[in-house]
Each structure stands twice: as C-alpha cells, then as structure tokens.
Image (cartoon, rainbow, N blue to C red):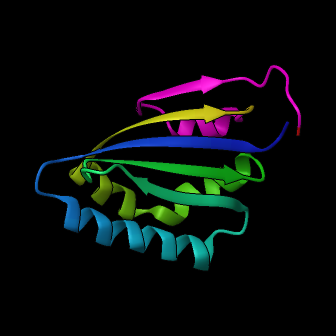
Amino acid sequence: MTEIQVIAHLNIKPGKIDEFKTLAHSCIEMVKQKDKGTLQYDWYFNENNTVCIVHERYINAEAGLQHIANLGELVVALFELCDMSFDIFGSPTQELKNALEGMNITYYEFAAGIN
C-alpha cells in the first residue's frame, strides 16, 4: 500500500476561528494550485467551530512531502491558531517521518481490508 492517508485534528484557539477559516481557505487554494499527488483534502468543522478535522490522501509518501513543502509558511501560521495532532495511515517513508519529526503523530500500518 503506497497511498498515505492523514486525519488531522485541529483544536482551534479561542477567538481565532475567523483567522483560522481564512487560513484554511488559503491552504485549500494552495493544494489546488500546487499539489500534484493529493487525492483528497477535505476540511470539516464541529458545530461550535472549535475543532476542525482534515481528511488528506496522497498517492504516496513523496506527494505528502511535496504537500508539506508547498504549505510552507501557511503551516507555521496554523500552529499559531490551533493545536494539532495527526493520525497517519499507510507506510510513510523515513524521509516523510523525518519531515514530521516533533509533531504529535500516531502512525498506523495497514493490516487488512478491501480496496
């Protein structure tokens, strides 16, 4: 399984929702314009607009690395507006793991299923 799936959990800091939504739109536009290997990039908000979940799918680990590079300063700005944790599914390369070092991440290896 080369596809990488990510579920990002973003807990938005109080009073930051408007800034956060503006930045979310910028991230989505960047993905549309620059990412070549992104299969899914969907943002969901809870009823209170305090938590955002982002579903991400990449054709492979290299596409995930490209996404990180393309986000650049946008991700730095996101860190100021929310607390993040990530669930990553698949078999990320060591290079991808190194790029994500220091972040709150749980990795899950594929076991079985239907594709």
Seen at 56% across and 49% down, the residue is 55
Tell me the residue at 28%/59% (across/down).
77
Q: Residue furthest right?
A: 114
Left-right relation of 67 to 103: right
Q: Is residue 46 above or below residue 100?
A: below
Determine which quarter of the picture holds residue 9: top left
User: Farthest top residue?
Assistant: 111
Looking at the picture, tell me which residue is in the foreground, 25 or 104.
Answer: 25
Answer whether residue 81 is magenta in the image.
Answer: no
Q: Is residue 1 left or right of residue 8?
A: right
Q: Which quadrant is the N terminus positioned in?
A: top right
Horizontal side, residue 81 vs residue 113: left or right: left
| Residue 20 horizontal/vertical position (percent) | 27, 62
Vertical placement of residue 43 versus 7, above or below: below
- 20 and 49: which one is in front? 49
Residue 38 percent across, percent down from the top left: 68, 61
Residue furthest to the front: 47
Q: Residue at x 65, y 59 (%)?
A: 40
- Counting every numbered tag in the picture gives 0
Please provide the residue range marked out in magenta. 92-114
Residue 110 inside the magenta-drawn segment: yes
Percent x, y of residue 41: 58, 60
Screen quadrant of the C terminus: top right
Q: Is residue 38 above or below residue 60?
A: below
Q: Residue at x 50, y 77 (%)?
A: 29
